[in-house]
Amino acid sequence: MKVGPLLGMFMVIAAVVGTTGSALADHRRDRGDRDWVDEYRDGPCRVREASNDGDYRKVIRCPDGRGKTWRRGRWERDFRDGPCRVRIEASREVYRKDVTCRGRHYD
């Protein structure tokens, strides 16, 4: 029995299943919705991202500060990025980033 035809058929099936899975995984962006919420884990931290009509919020919570990637201590930062206002608040366990966009393309 020759292995070549079976290997070729396996490769075709794997390619079809792989593209179908990746197309289904990106369903949120395909609908054109402006409102969405996404929750997932990044190591020991819990991440929650949400968007609502031009506003974006990302909150990372790390129990006891394990797994955090931001600098130490409690700090805040406000700045503008084009038409958006960005506010970042951080402490030992929580990192919060709020982006509020108001302008011609976000109303």
Image (cartoon, helix red, strand yellow):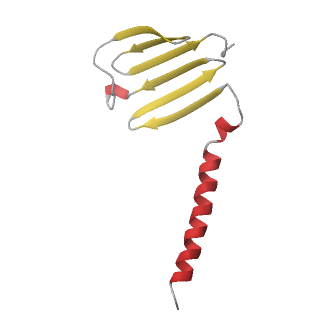
Query: Which residue lies at the image location 71% right of the left edge and 32% below the top edge?
Result: 32
Residue 91, image x, y percentages = 35, 16
Residue furthest to the bottom in view is 1
Q: Is 88 on the left or on the right of 105, as rendered?
A: left
Residue 7, image x, y percentages = 52, 77
Residue 61, image x, y percentages = 42, 25
Q: Is 26 on the left or on the right of 60, as rendered?
A: right
Query: Which residue lies at the image location 67% right of the left edge and 12% below the top edge?
Result: 104
Against 40, residue 14 (above or below) is below
Q: Which one is in front, 75 or 7? A: 7
Query: Which residue lies at the image location 65% right of the left edge and 48% below the top edge?
Result: 24
Query: Which residue lies at the image location 56% right of the left edge and 80% below the top edge?
Result: 6
Against 78, residue 29 (above or below) is below
Against 14, residue 50 (above or below) is above
Q: Quadrant of the C terminus?
A: top right
Residue 48, image x, y percentages = 52, 28
